[in-house]
Image: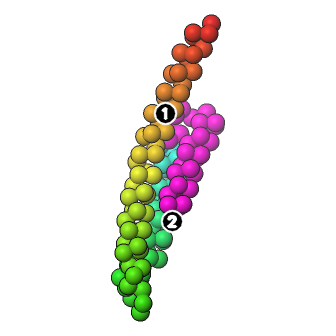
Amino acid sequence: MDIVVNNGILLVDFAKMGMAKGLDLRAALLDAVRHRTRPILMTAGASAVGMIPIALEWAVGIERLSPMAVVAIGGLMVGTFLTLLVVPLLFFTLETWRVRFNGWLHSKAA
């Protein structure tokens, strides 16, 4: 779970850095996804591949850990998919709402 959370944080942070450089929200998100996809896939893939021997019960006495490894591999894959698809969409939506709300709030105050 920690890997997925860190990947999501890094993706959003990379998008915010792009916005600080002057890119609009959509361009910053596309740039962040374009540059962070490979490291995210490599990190999650390496962790999943490392758990394959446990999931396949290749060692003596590992039978009780096999179900946990299978679930961890599935969770990593689902979390990686959500990091690359849902996190940018959610960030785009929330950032758009934030900008609209701040504009509405400032127009009411004036």
What is the image's colouring? rainbow
Residue 31, position as x, y percentages in the image: 51, 45
**Disc number at residue 43?**
2
Q: Is residue 84 above or below residue 72?
A: above
Question: Which quadrant would the C terminus be assigned to in this image?
Answer: top right
What range is drawn magenta here? 1-29
Q: What amino acid is at disc 2?
A: Thr
Please say whether residue 93 is visible from this viewpoint: yes
- In the rendered image, which quarter is residue 69 located in? bottom left
Farthest residue in the top direction?
A: 110
Q: Secondary structure at mark 1?
A: helix
- Kindly identify the residue that appears in the image at 54 percent across and 60 percent down: 2
- Kindly identify the residue that appears in the image at 41 percent across and 46 percent down: 86
Which of the marked residues, 1 or 2, is nearer the chain's N terminus? Answer: 2
User: Crowdedness of circle 1 by 10 Å Cα count: few (<14), some, many (20+)?
Assistant: few
Q: Nearer the viewer, residue 5 or 89?
A: 5
Q: Is residue 97 above or below residue 43?
A: above
- Kindly identify the residue that appears in the image at 41 percent across and 92 percent down: 60
Is 56 placed left or right of 100 in the picture?
Answer: left
